[in-house]
Amino acid sequence: MNKLKHQATLFCWSMLLLEVSCLTEFEITVPRGPVTGFYGEALILPCTFPVDSWDLSSTLISWKRGLDVAHSFYYSQLLLQLDRQNPHYVNRTSLFIQEMAEGNASLKLDRVTLQDSGVYTCSISTNTGSQKKSFRVDIAAFYSEPRLQFSMLTDGVNLLVTSDGGYPSPTLQWLMENSDITNQTQTHIMKDTQTGLYIVSSWINLTEVTNSSLTFILNNKPLGQEIRREIQLYSDKRERQGESAYRCHGCFILIPVILLLLIIIMGLLFVFITSRRREQTKLNGFTNMGLKSETKILNEKFQQCPGA
């Protein structure tokens, strides 16, 4: 009797271990760390599962962000499952149906927006087991090529650098001859009201400038984007009658422009006066010719008269 009980116990443990073994064999795979998507582009959320003795008709695949259903698939009720989809994802999600037999349950998300960031959960249930795993999705965008504006001041120069269309908020740095001068700059970062992307403006006022090199650095860490631009400054600043050479430089630029405009205006006046004189001369010539012709005709008629 004891022997039968012992055999029954062994059998139960064997079945239990077999069941645990079967459960542990069904292991889905998702990214271990965060996945970064590019704003406005398509993003693939990876998820795979084992397909040994797999039956498509009993396969259920569900993707959620928090409690919101991004996409849900059941072989015989595909349309019914899509009815449960959150409106934010309508017409933007799809599965790789042709690759599902190979264990591909990845989700394709089109036209990514900043609102798509969050924790996504891939849930899979088949005839061989079920499991769900989660991972984080971050959305980022590249910053545009910086634009430089340069303006003269009474006591120096102002440099303004702008860039937009990026996400998240960047880190900025200014260097002068490899020395950090970021604390001498002013930076304004704001969000576009429609896209949520950032617009960055950073400027610096410099006085007593000599020939030097400035470096502007913008870092967008999630995308590994680093924009580094060098600005070369040249100055022969000399004090003359209490005014800086920056103002003189402005005068030197304006004088040739004014002289050129005066020459052009004088040339146009000369051409206009010359053409008017020529037209007047021609008009006078035609008038004199007309008078001579009329006088000649009168003389001929007078000579033909009988008493002449």
Image (cartoon, rainbow, N blue to C red):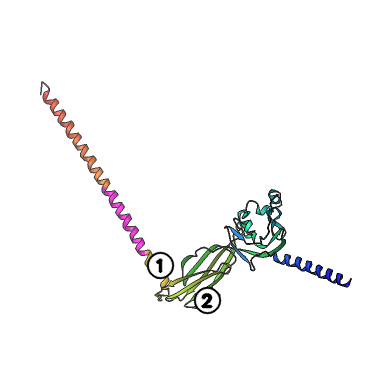
Please give the range of residues in magenta. 255-274
Classify 236 as above or below 134: below
Q: Residue 56: x percent and y percent?
A: 68, 54
Q: Nearer the viewer, residue 34 or 75?
A: 75
* Figure check: 67 above or below 297: below
Which labelled disc corresponds to residue 250? Answer: 1
The answer to whether residue 225 is above or below residue 54 is: below
Residue 36 in picture, x, y percent from top left: 60, 64
Q: Residue furthest top?
A: 306
Residue lying farthest bottom? Answer: 179
User: Which residue is drawn at the image coordinates 60% and 59% (left, top)?
Assistant: 43
Residue identified by numbered label 2: 181
> Pointer 2: residues within 10 angstroms few (<14), some, or many (20+)?
some
The quadrant where residue 246 appears:
bottom left
Q: Is residue 256 magenta?
A: yes
- At x 26%, y 49%, the residue is 274
**Residue at x 78%, y 66% (from the top left corner):** 15
Give the residue displayed 55% in from the left and 75% down from the top: 183
* CA neighbours of label 1 inside 10 A, class few (<14), some (14 to 19), many (20+): few
Q: Which amino acid lies under the numbered mark 2 shown in the image of this protein?
A: Ile
Name the side, left or right, on which 113 lies relative to 145: right
Main SS of the magenta part reads helix
